[in-house]
Each structure stands twice: as C-alpha cells, then as structure tokens.
C-alpha cells in the first residue's frame, strides 16, 4: 500500500488516502534505546584486542562494532588502536574470508573518519600508507588511496602516490579497480566540463519509457533534486489531488523531491558503499519494506529498484531484450545523447556494474537525523540521512512515532502515475555544476527547474 504524503500543514488528506498509524520503532523512547544500543556497541571495551582478537570467531562482534563506529563516530584512543590493527593486516595474503570482510569494513570506516578529521584521526595515515605500499588487494589499495587523496594531499604528493601505485602494479590498466580509481583520482580536483544539460533532459533512453532525473551537486553533502518525464517524454506535473489525472493548468507543480546521494563513509562511487554513481540505471518497480528489524535502515515505505549494467536480477535493461545490458561500453553509450557518450562521469554506473556494485534503491529512512553523528557536518542536508550507495529520501516522525513528512509516497505515487502499478523506466543521476545551474552549494530549486525547462522549450503541459 502507498500511504499519502503526510504534511502537518496540509488542510486535508487526499480523498481516500489515510495516514499511516504511529510506529512503535519511531517513538522518542525507541530511538533513545536504539542510540544507546549503538553507543554500547562502540564503547571503549568493545575495541579490546585481547578480549576480541581479529579472528573469524569474532566476526559478528567486530562487524557490529565497526557499524556502530560508523554511526556514532566515537573519539577514543581504543578506536584508533583497533582500526590500526586491522590496517596492519592488509599486506597479508593468508587472511581467511571472515578476516578479509572485517579488514575491508575497517578500511571503509577508516576512510570515513580520516577523511572527516585528518588531524584527529591522523594515526590512521600510517596504516593507510602501509596498505598502499604493501597490500596485494587492488580494492584495498584503491580504498586507502582514496582516503589519503581525498583527505587533502597537495597536487605533487597526490601525483607521487598515484605513480607509486602504477609502479607497484605494472599491469594496472588491466586491473579494473585500480584503473578506475587512478583515472578518477587523477582529476579529483578538476571541474569536469559537462556537455549541455539540455541534451540530457530532452533525450529518452528508450522510446515509451519514463525517465527520472536526479540532479546532484558535485558535493554530495548538498541534496539532489528529482525531475520526472512520462512515457511521452513530457515533464510530469502534479495536480493538487493525489491520483487525479493531470490537468491542463500551467500552475501545476513539477513532480520533484529532494534526495541524498551521500555515502555514510564518504567513499567514491566506484567502491562498495560509495556515493551513488552518476549515469543510467534501469528502473523496475519496487520491493516491500523489509520487516521492522530493518526499519531504521530503509524507512516504512516500499523501496524503488534501480539496476546498473551487468546486474543479474534485472528483467530487461534494454527492453524488449530480456536480461542485463548486452554488449560493451558502446551499448551503454547508445542509451545516452550523442554529446554525452564520451563524458567519463556519466559512465560511472557502467563501470560500477563492471566492478560488481549492485542493490541500488531509492528508499526512505526511519532513523532520527541526529542518529548519524556525521550529519552535523552537512547542514545543507539537515533532515536527510546518508546511505551506503542508495538514494535516500526524507522521513520524519514525531515523538509518538507518527509520520510528519515522508517523500517516498510522493516518489511512489508519481512513478505509478506515469508508469502504472508495475512501473519501469530509467533513472539518470548526474552532477550539475555552477556552469550549468548556479548555486553550487545549494540544492537545485523548483524555480530553477522551471526556468531551465522554459529555456529549453521542451515541456508540453498536459
């Protein structure tokens, strides 16, 4: 069931649509217990390496502790000591699968903490350097390399580090994680000159398929803005009543919400748990919200399925051909407008799929916004929580567990309106710089979208 968007300032609910009941998991008391549980799991004694050695038998303990570390960001010497011990394992070739999983998670958390405060978490630099210098694992090297570069190396040091990795791995061009990482990091501070946004917004990847655009800023601490086209390639405008056939009023608002594409760990797009990649996704219906055990991760509403190229579970990446994308980069580029096909950033979903990333969704989040300690570093996206690769919608509850505002109903209703109950289509995620739409430190506004559409003269009001 799709609940109507609950707004405490609205005069009335849409006809026939009821408010969801209060949720016990979202009450102030439940949230306090949840926060305390995560604080307990990141208490200093949890990092005791004698009591909890870095062995397969302790995997559950360490995965719970590391996840709590990401959520609560405790500042304690024990945290640094444990993460340092994990990083010291990266040169070894004899780690069992459980240890490998724990080490990779520790690298992700180290990326998050060191990137947020290179001074306070400075001791982690030693282990990150050790990983770059000695680890045989290409993905771990890419993780450590990203952490060091994104924390603020100057151009000369960055180039020296990139050259070092190329020397260590002479076949780096054939090692996909390193190839992609080195290419991406080489231009980390350079603004990409994107092709005309007009081309992208006027294009339909497959005729007759709806298209959702997610227009982000290069800084993913700033929220992204959605823009939806129907099967006919016209920008979708909403009437004031949910479920009503769109009218012919020019004043009808564009269907749009704000989404977060920020990675909790501040990881780049090509790494697991990294920020939402730019590029083209296949859109295929929804999956039900998991049971309340996972309520806090995904919110209360259905999740929208997004598939990158080469993801096996897609029904038809390019209908009517069943299955995932057939062919190489050229087949992917054919789904993009001509002037965008050679633009490296818009190929991110293609390479992310090649690297094995999957399970992208648009989902809400039932967590309180102060549950993620690093939210305080991103004031322009207050009210939205980070994800680990997905696009996150706002979902706010009062102390009694009653929904105050949720944008997932808005997303689900609009996609159903343009695509039917079992909607399909495409999602295009793209970073939009100052040269395209001014105000790089702020989300793109509805008025800016209206001006953009008026300039392009590509909308026909239905």
Image (cartoon, rainbow, N blue to C red):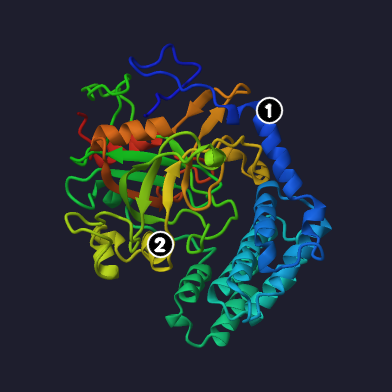
Q: Is residue 204 left or right of residue 412?
A: left
Q: Is residue 457 above or below residue 239?
A: below
Q: Single out the residue that lies furthest toward the top.
A: 11
Q: Nearer the viewer, residue 435 or 3?
A: 3
Sooner in the amino-acid sequence: mark 1 or mark 2: 1
The answer to whether the residue labelled 1 contacts the one labelled 2, judged by CB atoms less than 8 Å apart, is: no
Q: Residue at x 79, y 52 (%)?
A: 75
Q: Is residue 330 above or below residue 211?
A: below
- Closer to viewer: mark 1 or mark 2: 1
Q: Which residue is mark 2?
A: 348
Q: Is residue 364 above or below residue 432?
A: above
Quadrant in the picture for residue 400? top right
Q: Nearer the viewer, residue 232 or 403?
A: 403
Q: Is residue 369 above or below residue 192?
A: above
Q: Residue at x 66, y 46 (%)?
A: 374
Q: Is residue 119 visible?
A: no
How dense is the environment of label 2, judged by Cα within 10 Å: few (below 14), some, or many (20 and up)?
many
Which quarter of the rendered picture does the C terminus lie within? top left
Disc 1 on helix, strand or loop?
A: helix
Q: Is residue 295 visible?
A: yes
Disc 2 on helix, strand or loop?
A: helix
- Which numbered tag is attached to residue 29? 1
Quadrant in the picture for residue 253? top left
Which quarter of the rendered picture does the N terminus lie within? top left
Q: Position of residue 323 (x, y in %)?
A: 25, 60
């Amino acid at each position: 069931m799709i609940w109507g968007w609950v707004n405490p300032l609205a005069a009335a609910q849409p006809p026939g649509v009821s408010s969801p009941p209060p949720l016990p998991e979202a009450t102030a008391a439940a949230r306090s217990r949840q926060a305390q549980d995560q604080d307990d799991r990141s208490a200093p004694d949890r990092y005791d390496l004698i009591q909890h050695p870095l062995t397969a038998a302790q995997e559950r303990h360490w995965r719970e502790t590391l996840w709590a570390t990401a959520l609560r960001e405790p500042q304690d010497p024990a945290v640094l000591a444990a993460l340092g011990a994990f990083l010291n394992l990266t040169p070894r070739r004899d780690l069992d699968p459980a240890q490998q999983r724990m080490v990779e998670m520790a690298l992700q958390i180290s990326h998050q903490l060191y990137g947020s405060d290179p001074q306070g978490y400075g001791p982690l630099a030693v282990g990150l350097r050790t990983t770059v210098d000695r680890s045989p694992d290409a993905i771990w090297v890419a993780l450590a390399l990203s952490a060091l570069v994104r924390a603020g190396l100057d151009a000369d040091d960055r180039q020296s580090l990139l050259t070092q990795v190329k020397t260590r791995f002479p076949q780096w061009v054939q090692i996909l994680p390193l190839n992609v990482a080195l290419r991406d990091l080489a231009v980390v501070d350079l603004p990409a000159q994107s092709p005309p946004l007009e081309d992208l917004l006027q294009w339909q990847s497959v005729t007759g398929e709806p298209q959702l655009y997610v227009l982000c800023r290069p800084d993913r601490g700033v929220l992204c803005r959605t823009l939806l086209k129907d099967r006919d390639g016209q920008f979708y405008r909403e009437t004031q009543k949910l479920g009503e056939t769109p009218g012919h009023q020019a004043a009808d608002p564009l269907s749009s919400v704000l989404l977060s594409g920020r990675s909790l760990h501040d990881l780049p797009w090509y790494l697991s748990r990294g920020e939402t990649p730019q590029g083209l996704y296949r859109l295929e219906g929804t999956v039900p919200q998991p049971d309340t055990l996972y309520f806090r991760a995904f919110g209360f509403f259905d999740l929208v399925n997004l598939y990158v190229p080469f993801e096996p579970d897609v029904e038809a990446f390019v209908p009517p051909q069943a299955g995932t994308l057939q062919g190489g980069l050229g087949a992917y580029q054919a789904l993009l407008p001509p002037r965008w096909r050679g633009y490296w950033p818009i190929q991110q979903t293609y390479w992310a799929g090649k690297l094995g990333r999957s399970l992208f969704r648009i989902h809400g989040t039932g967590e309180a916004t102060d549950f993620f300690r690093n939210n305080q570093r991103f004031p322009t996206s207050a009210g939205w929580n980070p994800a680990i690769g997905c696009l996150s919608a706002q979902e706010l509850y009062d102390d009694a567990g009653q929904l105050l505002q949720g944008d997932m109903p808005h997303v689900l209703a609009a996609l159903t309106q343009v695509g039917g109950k079992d909607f399909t289509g495409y999602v295009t995620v793209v970073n939009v710089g100052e040269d395209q739409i001014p105000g790089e430190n702020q989300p793109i506004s509805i008025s800016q979208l209206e001006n953009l559409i008026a300039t392009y003269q590509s909308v026909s009001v239905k």
